[in-house]
Amino acid sequence: MPCIFCDIPTERIVWQDELVFAIRDAFPVTEGHTLLIPKRHVATWFEATEAEQRALMRGLDAAKAQLDATEAPDGYNIGINAGAAAGQTVMHLHVHLIPRRTGDVDDPRGGVRHVIPGKGNYLGRGHD
Ligand code: 5GP
Ligand code: ZN
């Protein structure tokens, strides 16, 4: 089965080590949206080895340092969609690193909680 992340042209790679590489997302949520991807084809975080998981986390730090230097964003969202039910569309593990800027949305509270529309901002909902 063809896989776009197994066939990424090397010139698209912005960082790599033995196990993992980073590319910019082709359809970025924000400027600088970066994907950390294991070189071995595995479907989700849970099939990756501990060494691959550690390399992905090192890659996050490396890509974040690059983005801090070039874009100086105000924050980041980090996310993994594991499985089609969770929204995964490319079935080769990748970690999203999404730079955020103050004011890029009206109310950012909740961040990654917004995967379920309407459930993100528990602070803005009032309490029972
Ligand atoms: P998922 O929905 O599986 O978590 O994320 C897949 C990501 O891959 C999306 O953010 C999408 O924009 C990105 N993407 C899809 N096709 C390509 C491609 O050909 N090149 C790159 N760099 N990113 C891609
Ligand atoms: Zn693949």
Image: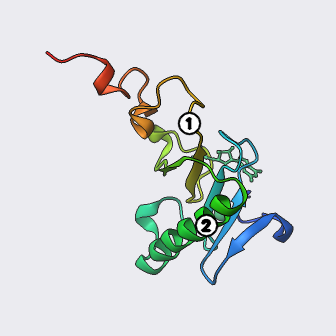
Classify residue 94 as left or right of residue 124.
right
- Amino acid type of the residue tagged 2 in the rendering: Ala
Classify residue 45 as left or right of residue 13.
left
Q: Position of residue 35 (x, y in %)?
A: 63, 57
- Label 2 environment density (alpha carbons within 10 Å; few <14, some 14–19, many ≥20): few
Q: Position of residue 102 (x, y in %)?
A: 56, 36
Q: Give the residue at x 52% y 74%.
A: 58
- Label 1 environment density (alpha carbons within 10 Å; few <14, some 14–19, many ≥20): few
- Residue 71 or residue 13, whichever sits in front: 71
Q: Which residue is mark 1?
A: 102
Q: Quadrant of residue 88?
A: top right
Q: How many marks?
A: 2
Above-or-below relation of 119 to 115: above
**Which residue reaches farthest left?**
128
Q: Is mark 2 within 8 Å of ligand 1?
A: no
Disc 2 to disc 1, C-alpha distance:
19 Å
- Residue 3 or residue 28, whichever sits in front: 28
Q: Which residue is mark 2?
A: 65
Nearer to us: label 2 or label 1: 1
